[in-house]
Amino acid sequence: MELEKSIKVKILTFFSLVMAKIIIISSCSIPDQSTAYSLSRVDHSTPFVVPASTRAVYLPLVLGGGTAALEWTQLAGNPQRTAYVPVDLPKPWRVKWIWNGPPKGRDGTPAPGHLRLPRGVQPITGDGKVYIGHYDGIVRALSEATGDVVWSTSIGGQILNTAAYDHATRSVYVGSTNGRLYRLNSADGVILGNFNAGGQIHMAPLLVDNTLYVGSTNGTFYALDKVSLQPRWSYNAGGALYGSPAYSSRYGGLVIILVEGTPRPSVHALRIGDGSRRWRQNSVPGFDPEDRGDNLAFLDTYPVVSDVNNVVIVRTYRSQERQYMNAGSPNNTAPRTVEEIRSLLTQRPDFESFYVLDLDTGARKYVAPIAVGGIGDGIWTVGPQAVVKKMSDGSEVAYVLWRTYQACESLGGSACDARDDTTLGEMDLATGNIRFVQDWRNEGTMRIHSDEQSPLSMAGDTIFHAHWMTLGSLRITDRSSRYGSSYTNPIRTEEVYPVVNGIRVGTCPSRSNYFCPEAMLLPNNEPNQDPGFYIYYTNQPQYDLWWSSSTGNPNNPDLPPASPVRSAAISNKTIYWKTVDGAIIAVGP
């Protein structure tokens, strides 16, 4: 889509933002609700103050599929599941509210009645509300302004994944393990209709224009009219459906679905017009047959589409033992260079879990140089999905976590092992080559380990890493061609405000409104973090108290799992981070 020139209006000396559609800026106001802070060490723009009488107006940018890109209305923000919004968040930031955390407005531990939210649930927004489902079968709508519960509606069963919101009909769509997909009125939560999918619904629904897509564990995938919920077509996938679908605008429109199966899972591309299959890819390795058991390949996962590059990215669960590569590099780490990593994965596909497929045929585009990494999931693990960003010239690149020996060389030979070889990268989706991105790990913002790889999302040039302990944030400052060739010469970034799960009782006496202007001391002697925001004031790490991991089996008694598989959501210039214990914090200007 061609960028249009933004209309310039004087706002002190603040420059006009450039977005991917039309953005009219008449100002940017700071709500006068609480103290706002900015940190000189992590500043990424000049602080500014705007008269209260002015306000900003943004015309929503519309991507393929009819989603307003500045509002996070479904899983990963849009039908392509890119987890990217095309706007940077102005500072200063502040905590707007915390829901399902400590007692409102006070420091402490989780308040009575605390809910342990499903890990597959991600906050979505629309009609001035934030929508969350829960194991108790209740959909809750929170006020975007205050975080207070506006309404709650019980639909029965368990809600295990993310809802979807439609602007045109002001409807919220959510699936349940009772086998039904529900349409709710966003104003009051009244149930407007439901559809029986014939099996448990574990996936997030996909909304594209006037059609809603959903499947169930019985293996049938449906295209539904978004108002009547009557089927337009159905498709027998031949295997259970747990992972969520994604949309591509290529070839007249495709829906990409993830299908469980024996001996291997598969990926299918369906034409949106009639549900006929364009291709099926059933050679995605993604499994260790000796370790598989009853585990699933795609539980809680989703494809990511780059229409510009004509590819779809798929991730699968693998045995976490594959993290220890025994690949000839010191201490079981990944090799040093992109070429060496690709060579190893070509010879040892059991170390892969990241696949780039051609949207036209489903064939492997290339061997991506991304080896198995995980998110602290115990026996069975999945690495975080890529974020696909549209650049100012219309091209698209992916931001990923990847493993290379270069990332831990600086630690010294004895200290460098397979847990310490992960870093950030920018992937050229046409070739699979990766440039290094400055990660600032262990510097007080980003916590990155190969067995703690956590979900990514992005707003403008700012990358968010949703670790269970810290929501780390980095802003890209210079990605010119002279950078990115090695870990010691990366694309340049700067640290932005971290948000931590909790800080130690008795620390940070100058704290205010969940902001600590000094180094944050974490419970249980975890590494200190930079000045930033916190949720709990406690001597016990809440993420440990509420933690459990998953074996990839939805029937495993260890569930409900709490390890993070959902990124922070960014909507209407606000960051919504759901912690592993179930709190949601809203941070923004």
Image (tube, grey):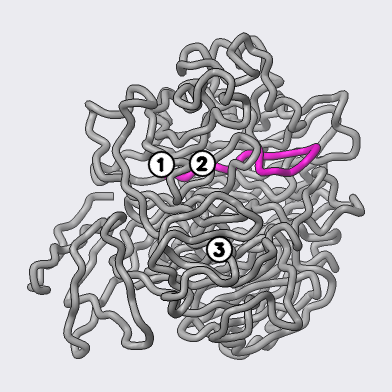
Q: Residue at x 77, y 31 (%)?
A: 319
Q: Please state which of the two labelled residues, at mark 3 or mark 2, is closer to the viewer.
A: 2
> Depth check: 319 or 241 in front?
319
Q: Residue at x 48, y 34 (%)?
A: 423
- Say if mark 3 contacts mark 1, CB within 8 Å: no
Looking at the image, is 232 positioned above or below residue 412?
A: below
Which part of the image, by quadrant, shows the C terminus?
Answer: bottom left
Which disc, if any, is residue 74? 3
Q: Which of marks 1 and 2 is nearer the N terminus?
A: 2
348 relative position to 96: left or right: right
Q: How crowded is mark 2: few (under 14 residues within 10 Å), some or many (20 or more)?
A: many
Displayed quadrant of residue 351: top right
Say what amino acid the circle numbered 2 marks: Ala
Looking at the image, is 299 positioned above or below residue 126?
A: above
Instruction: Identify the residue position indicated by label 1 in the image.
Output: 440
Report the predominant secondary structure element of the magenta stretch: loop
Looking at the image, is 425 positioned above or below residue 523?
A: above
- Say if mark 1 contacts mark 2, CB within 8 Å: no
**What residue span does the magenta drawing correspond to?**
374-388
Counting from the top left corner in percent of width and height, residue 381 is at 72, 39
Q: Which of marks 3 and 1 is nearer the N terminus?
A: 3
- Does the image show residue 357? no
- CA gap between label 3 and label 2 equals 17 Å
Displayed quadrant of residue 536: bottom right
